[in-house]
Image (cartoon, grey):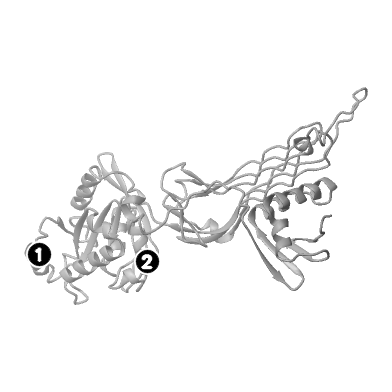
């Protein structure tokens, strides 16, 4: 089964918790705090593996979670950092954030890696909070949560040569003749509904990968027929072989077919109009093909496009096929390897996602609902998630934080009195007016 699109959930590993511990050794009075830090959670990393061709693995497993860091230890020992989780993806995979539709990465090269969900930092142990005023703190931090999100994977087939054309023009037959691939062949439209890949051995030590792509119809750039399911695979091909039914077996004008397909490619991605292209005039063993080919050449000349190379072939009879393959191999030697994303995607229209360094944001808003004041402050909420609020030192540190951030005075200005409830994130407490 060929799967070229998948939606999955990814999460970096949580950081390990720091601990509260005190050094106790014989003949060592006042040993002091010795709680170690927790280890960092593992990152979730995508790595390109050329041995993969589809996203079929993501059909059966849709949730990926990296391991969490180890808890801190006594005697000032830190917890171990968790190992990163490596997820293998095929070359040609585009990673997109499901919420923002931003491109996280475009993975094309063997071994290329990208971190899609970072692991959380480990929590600090109580030895980190020791000061001259508080030499024995009963305070530690929980590990930070790893990043999590839903992402969309889109696979664009990495092939050297892509066969394009209307349905039933003989693309699958041509691929089956020149390679060991066994695509479905039938006398009806859309026999091919997913790309088929085959390795073509030209001889003389030369070979390349050819893709039989699903048939195009007019309006495909707007999603008509197989639409974008087809067109995104054309972006990766280095050379386009345009297969045309020169015998007009379905009573279509071969030149109109040529113009319509190229227009669909241009409307989908303007840069595809500049992609090298040769024409395979197929079904030349059928009546009327020679006359249509002559008319095709004349129309190309009238439109000033007579520089396009045409190779008369019969895929079924295997006539002229070898000459086509030789020319394709010659052109591939002149075309750069794997087109980069800049060649196929307008970066001014689609934002590239980048991890930004997280910084505490102490800006806050306050709203009142009956006798409860609800405070929204990213920095304080993040601190609450990590702080152990079951200790006196934890509560003291929290009180210092809201005073320093200005939240306490702002609450007083909004009319907060003794007995009013204040909610910050999931933490709720009673406001007490200091004397």
When asked about the image quadrant of residue 230, the answer is bottom left
- Local crowd size for mark 1, using a 10 Å CA cut-off: few (<14), some (14–19), many (≥20): few
- Residue 424 visible to the viewer: no
Mark 2–mark 1 contact, CB under 8 Å? Answer: no
Q: For mark 2, give the secondary structure.
A: helix
Question: Where 270 sits versus 37, above or below?
Answer: below
Query: Residue 204: image x %, image y %?
Result: 25, 39
Residue at the bottom extreme of this rendering? 251
Foreground residue among 88 and 150: 150
Residue at the top extreme of this rendering? 27
For disc 1, the marked residue is 303
Q: Earlier in the sequence, mark 2 or mark 1?
A: 2
Residue in the picture at 11% in, 55% down:
307
- Residue 339 visible to the viewer: yes
Foreground residue among 332 and 22: 22
Question: Where 156 sits versus 50, above or below?
Answer: below
Count of marks placed on residues: 2
User: Quarter of the image containing the C terminus?
Assistant: bottom right
Residue in the picture at 70% in, 56% down:
407
Residue at the right extreme of this rendering? 26
Apparent side of residue 13 relative to residue 203 in the rendered image (left or right): right
Foreground residue among 179 and 421: 421
For disc 2, the marked residue is 228
Q: For mark 1, give the secondary structure.
A: loop
Q: How far, Cα to Cα, is label 2 from label 1?
A: 29 Å
Foreground residue among 4 and 282: 4
Query: Residue 288: image x %, image y %?
Result: 12, 71
Apparent side of residue 199 relative to residue 417 in the rendered image (left or right): left
Apparent side of residue 397 relative to residue 309 in the rendered image (left or right): right
When asked about the image quadrant of residue 220, the answer is bottom left
Query: Residue 212: image x %, image y %?
Result: 33, 59
Residue 268, disc? none
């Amino acid at each position: 089964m060929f799967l070229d699109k998948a939606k999955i959930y990814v999460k970096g590993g949580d950081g390990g918790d720091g601990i509260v511990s005190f050094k106790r050794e014989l003949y060592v009075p006042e040993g002091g705090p010795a709680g170690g830090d927790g280890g960092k959670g593992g990152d979730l990393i995508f790595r390109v593996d050329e041995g993969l061709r589809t996203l079929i693995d993501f059909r059966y497993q849709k949730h990926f979670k990296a391991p969490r860091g180890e808890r801190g230890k006594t005697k000032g020992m830190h917890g171990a950092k968790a190992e990163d989780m490596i997820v293998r993806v095929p070359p040609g995979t585009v990673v997109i954030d499901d919420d923002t539709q931003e491109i996280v990465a475009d993975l094309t090269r063997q071994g290329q890696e990208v971190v899609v969900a970072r692991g959380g930092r480990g929590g600090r142990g109580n030895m980190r909070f020791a000061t001259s005023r508080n030499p024995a703190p009963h305070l530690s931090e929980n590990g930070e949560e790893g990043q999590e999100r839903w992402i969309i994977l889109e696979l664009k087939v990495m092939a050297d040569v892509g066969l394009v054309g209307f349905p039933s023009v003989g693309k699958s037959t041509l691929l089956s003749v020149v390679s060991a691939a066994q695509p479905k062949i039938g006398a009806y439209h859309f026999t091919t509904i997913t790309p088929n890949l085959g390795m073509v051995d030209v001889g003389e030590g030369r070979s390349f990968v050819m893709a039989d792509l699903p048939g195009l119809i007019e309006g495909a750039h707007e999603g008509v027929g197989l639409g974008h399911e087809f067109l995104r695979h054309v972006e990766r091909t280095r050379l386009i072989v345009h297969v045309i039914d020169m015998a007009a077996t379905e009573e279509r004008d071969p030149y109109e077919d040529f113009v319509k397909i190229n227009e669909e490619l241009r409307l989908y991605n303007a840069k595809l109009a500049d992609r090298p292209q040769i024409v395979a005039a197929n079904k030349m063993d059928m009546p009327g093909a020679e006359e249509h080919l002559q008319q095709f050449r004349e129309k190309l000349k009238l439109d000033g496009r007579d520089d396009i190379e045409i190779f008369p072939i019969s895929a079924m009879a295997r006539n002229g096929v070898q000459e086509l393959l030789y020319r394709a191999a010659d052109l591939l030697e002149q075309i750069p390897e794997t087109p980069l994303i800049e060649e196929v995607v307008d970066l001014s229209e689609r934002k590239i996602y980048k991890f930004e360094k997280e910084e505490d944001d102490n800006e806050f808003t306050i709203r009142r609902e009956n006798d409860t004041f609800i405070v929204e402050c990213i920095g304080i909420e993040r601190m609450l998630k990590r702080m152990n609020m079951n200790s006196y030192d934890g509560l003291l540190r929290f009180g210092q934080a809201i005073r320093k951030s200005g939240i306490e005075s702002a609450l007083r200005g909004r009319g907060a009195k003794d007995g009013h409830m204040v909610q910050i994130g999931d933490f709720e407490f009673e406001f007490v007016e200091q004397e």
